[in-house]
Each structure stands twice: as structure tokens, then as C-alpha cells.
Amino acid sequence: MPRPRPSPGRPVDLQQLGLVGARRREVELRARRRGLGAARELAETLYLLRERHGRSIVLGLRDVLQDRDTVRRAWADPAHASALRDCYDAIWIYSDPAVYDLMRECPVFDAVADRVRYTGYLDQRPRLELVKANVDSMLSKLPEGRLALCVVGGGFDGDELAEAFLHAELPDDMIGVVVTGPYMPEESRMRLNRALARQPRMQLIDFLPEPVALIERADRVVAMGGYNTVCEVLSFEKHALIVPRVRPGREQWIRAQRLRELGLVRVLHPDRLTPRALSDWLAADLGAPPPSRSRVDFGGLARIPGMMAALISASHAEAPAPAPALAVPPALAVSPAPAVPPALATQAAAAVAPVRVKAVPA
């Protein structure tokens, strides 16, 4: 019985990935949400990589994808199961199963469990040395005092949190900074600027490419619950109040709840978000900073090079025959693709043959 094949989305151009004629043997494609990409844009690319170029492919996943039922529905398509089985040689989860065990919570990956490995979360502190020179002048212009920082990710739905923060009362020795993010609607920015006029100890920053220096400087952080922001807050062991997105998906709520159970963050449901709730948290005596790095594995950045080296070593030692070709469905033969947004795919250079990566026990 023929295996189900995916219908194509907009494909990724192999030439633009730098793979045609290249000597690279390892490619990591971070598919968003599913093994074929958010809009199946990786469908043709994955099968062509395997058939024509013999690449080993790693699927990278964040800690929480969505709630269990949503993940089960999203991955129920036989085409996605086929892609996991046929195209990916390893699945790396950038987290610690002590926080959220994706394999246990979402058994859709059981069939490829031998390819799964947890890397640990990605410690964000090394980024500080790369960006500090570019933000030192901004940090030096901040008034003296303890810093309360509000960050809302990309900002497209963070206006309510930012506005509540701007209307909150700060302790006398504290200043406040809000980073709105690049995707906040202009109407929301204008409303925040009007609120800012009544808050002399608050500042508004429209966009900051690298917020880690501000997070490192902050005494308290009010934030939504996205993966990147949570990694930054925990890496610097900051007192954090997480106001997660709960609609349409529950990914941020699940992540925030698990971290609260570990005693690493405080959580406020967005339905209970008010300036008074933020004021009370900012004024509260929270004690010592949370020991995040001693309770959660943040060794991902240090561990991944070793994982890559192990794949290279295994390929040199075993020298396996080339993997059998996988036929690309005729429906996937499409015209040359347009330019690829950088977020769709990343590549890692190495000479690696397909191997199996076993899961690390929780």
C-alpha cells in the first residue's frame, strides 16, 4: 500500500539553502509546529534532500507545542507521520523533560522515539557579550534605580499587558521600561504613548533586536510566556511574572504553569490582568531570585556541538551505504521557489550520515 504523500505548500529552494553542489552533509530544518512546516512549505524540500542529496535532517522542537489534543489533531495527518518516519534522522527537543516531557505528554512521537533527544534549554547568557557593546549607551541613559521591565514578544497581541504595565504604580525606588516588539499595531503604539505621557518614571522602546541586556539589568520582569522570553528570564534567574497567552492556543499557559510548579515564576491569568495586580506584584517582597539554572537543565548550547560531533564520528566509523531514494510525488514538482524567509530553515555544516539518536530519560 503506498505511503501517503503530502500536498505541497510553497517549497523551499534548495539553491537558496546553499545545498546544490555543496559538500555539506548535515542540514537542520526547524519546522514550525509540524514536520512539514506550518504551511507544508518543507514538503518538497525534505523529499528532495533525501532523494537527490543524501542529507541527514534534524527536526528541532521547542518544549511545549500545544495542549495534547491539539498536537494529536495536528499530527494525525498520515503525511506528517510519513515525513517523521522517512525524512528525519533525529529529533532534538530544546528543553528539559523535567519541566515538560513532550514524549510523554504527546505520544504522537512514539513511532520515532529512538530518534529523540532532549538537548536541555538554551542558556541565553552568552548572547550578552555579543550585544552588550551595542546597547551600553542605551543602558547608561536609564535613570538610576531598580528596573521593572515589561516585554511582550513580537507585540502583535501584547498591547493589553503593555498598557496595564504603563498604568501600574511603581515603588518609589523603581523605574519601568516597556518593549513593545516589532509587530505591535500602530494604533496600539499610539495609545501606549498617550499613557506614557502620564508616567514620568516609565520609558517605551518600540523595538529592541536583542533584549538580553535589558533583562540582565532588570530586577523584575513582566512578560508573556513565549519560549524565547522564558529562556531569557530563566537564564538570568530573574523574578518574573508571566501573563501567558491562553487563546487561541494554550502553549504559553502550559509552559507557565509547569514553571510555576517548580517555583521559578509567578503566573497571572490574562483574564485577571489589571494595573493593580501588576502594582501589587511589583511592590511585593519576593525574596531571593529563583535558582532556575540549578533546577532546570540549561546545557543545550554546550551540549549540541557534542551531539553534532557524535553524529560525525558515527558516520566516519560506520561509513554506511547511501540511504535509498524516496520518490517525490509528481504533485510536488513545482516551479522554482521564491526567496526563503530566514525563519523557515537553518543549516548546520558537517559531514554526517543518517544515524539514530536515542531519547535521554527524564
Image (cartoon, rainbow, N blue to C red):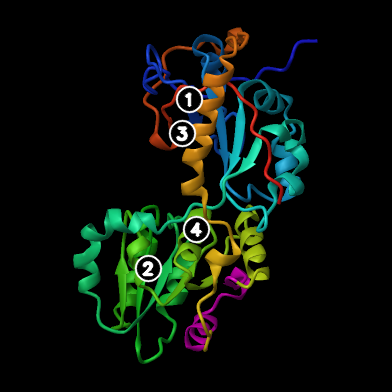
Q: Which residues are magenta?
A: 264-284
Q: Quadrant of the N terminus?
A: top right
Q: Is residue 327 magenta?
A: no
Mark nearer the N terminus (2 vs 1): 1
Q: Which residue is mark 1?
A: 26
Q: Are marks 1 and 3 in contact (CB under 8 Å)?
A: no
Residue contact between numbered discs 4 and 3, judged by CB atoms under 8 Å: no
| First in sequence: mark 3 vs mark 2 | 2
Q: What's the CA distance linking mark 4 and mark 3?
A: 21 Å
First-in-chain label (2 vs 4): 2
- Disc 3 target residue: 344
Q: State the SS at label 1.
A: strand
Q: Which residue is mark 2?
A: 216
Sequence-first disc among 4 and 3: 4
Residue 291, picture quadrant: bottom right
- The amino acid type found where label 2 is placed reads Glu
Q: Nearer the viewer, mark 4 or mark 3?
A: 4
| Mark 1 Cα shell of 10 Å, populated few (<14), some (14-19), many (≥20) | many
Report if residue 192 is visible in the image: yes
Rendered location of residue 125, percent (x, y): 40, 59
x, y percent for residue 327: 62, 8
What type is the residue that disc 3 sits on?
A: Leu
Q: Are marks 2 and 4 in contact (CB under 8 Å)?
A: no
Residue plotted at (37% across, 61% down): 212
- Place of residue 292 in the rendered image (x, y in percent of width and height, measured from the top left): 55, 67
Where 344 sits versus 248, above or below? above
Residue 231 is marked as 4
